[in-house]
Image (cartoon, rainbow, N blue to C red):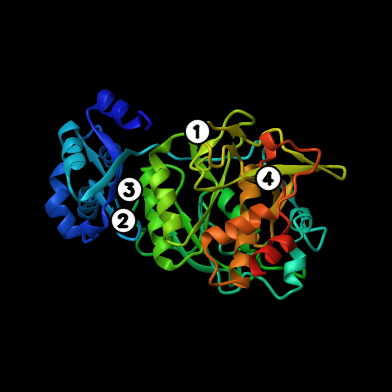
Amino acid sequence: MSDILENELASTGVARVIVRLKASAGTNRAELGASLGSSFVSAETSVVGQIASTMKKTRSLAKKQEEARMHVFPNLGLMLGTVDKEGLKKLRQSKQVARVRGAPIFSLIRPTEPPAAVSALSTDVTWGIQDLGIPALWSQGLSGNGVLVGHLDTGIDGRHRVFNGAIEEFMEFDLLGFPVNPKPDPWDSGDHGTHTAGTIAGRPVNGRHIGVAPGAMLLSGMVIEGGDAVARVLAGMDWIVGSGARVLNMSLGFRGFVDDFLDVTVILRERGVLPVFAAGNEGPGFTRSPGNYSEALSVGAYGLNGTRRVVADFSSSQRFARPDDPVVPDLVAPGVNVISARPGGNNNRYQAMPGTSMATPHVSGLAALLFEAKPAATVDEVEAAILDSCVRPASMTGARAGRGVPNAARALQLLTT
């Protein structure tokens, strides 16, 4: 158990907590408020209090601030709120509560180098899609059609041509973790989200592909950066689970092994969502949570040195003292010089970026193709097919690459036979 909760209480007198509810507790906000509401407090020193103090004072903000004191995420069976020592004691003693954990702060897993603008695509298929053998699945009629992929990031520029018909729904979550109303058109607060989304499900333009699953539909949520990041991410996850997604792509996290978000990752799997998370860009000996949980499908990055596949220097890796899945990442995917969509006024722009953030959507796209091939497949079955398809070349070590590089055709064969 991490010390986040205790450290927050000691330093500010209050702490943000994630509460996992027992099934018997239900998820009705009014009923939970009556039974557990007194455990939560409002405080100027809390995250919510400090964020609200910088926002415009309106009646709607006051209502949001009160609701943010005790968020309820019904599809996840979780609550998020601010407690003092007495409130924490009440929650831990409640028969409705399964577990109380701290709320660590998320941050984006940023590329290690500035993006490089690409004026036009020079090949029909990006190198990463080709190297994983994805076209072999396309030739069998697979495109991810009918599969919803959750995408929590900085947003998505819906004006780009590759997203024409690719966005099932877009949600922007404000600084306190509530959906922005009225709902805005899909936009990107940076460029990270547009790039990762393009690799997952970008549509071909003039016969040229950047998307692994060009028939999948995206549920894209803007959850980072700024504000109460935990509330924003949990709200995004709750929406994605409730919308029927089969895969969640997330290239963000918190440095080191922090187990406070472990319950959430377990819940995603229980709800039939495969969590595909980036391992981080801090190099060997360092990884990001929740990507370093054994319950996540963690992705590192590799590139090409001539014809040799090599793990990128920046790709995070770590060995943990646990019998199940001790090595992170589980596998590696193309994450160097990855060309994908670039946001902006010109809706046909591209750029190259490095990072495990760029590797992760390759695996999410592959998972979407596999779920299309076998709609009744479980999370465990699709994950196992991907992992068992991997081959680790002699140029990579298990400590840095995990299982190695997935092979799309082999994964499909393992899943369907």
Sequence-first tag of 3 and 1: 3
- Whether residue 251 is visible: yes
Q: Which residue is found at the position 68% from the left and 43% from the top?
A: 301
Write down the quadrant of residue 27 in the picture.
Answer: bottom left
Q: Residues within 10 Å of mark 3 (few under 14, many from 20)?
A: many
SS class, disc 1: strand
* 166, 400: nearer the viewer: 400
* 368, 314: nearer the viewer: 368
Q: Is residue 231 left or right of residue 109?
A: left
Please give the residue where the numbered disc 2 appears in the rendered image.
Answer: 77
Sequence-first tag of 3 and 2: 2
Q: What label does residue 403 carry, if any?
A: 4
Amino acid under disc 1 = Arg
The answer for how far apart the CA atoms under marks 1 and 2 are is 26 Å
Sequence-first tag of 1 and 4: 1
Image quadrant in which the N terminus is located = top left
The answer for how far apart the CA atoms under marks 3 and 1 are is 22 Å
Q: Is residue 16 left or right of residue 217?
A: left
Mark 3 vs mark 4: in front: 4
Q: What label does residue 176 carry, if any?
A: 3
Sequence-first tag of 2 and 4: 2
Mark 3 vs mark 1: in front: 1
Write down the quadrant of residue 93 in the picture.
Answer: top left
Please give the residue where the numbered disc 1 appears in the rendered image.
Answer: 255
Q: Is residue 318 above or below residue 227?
A: above
The answer for how far apart the CA atoms under marks 3 and 2 are is 19 Å
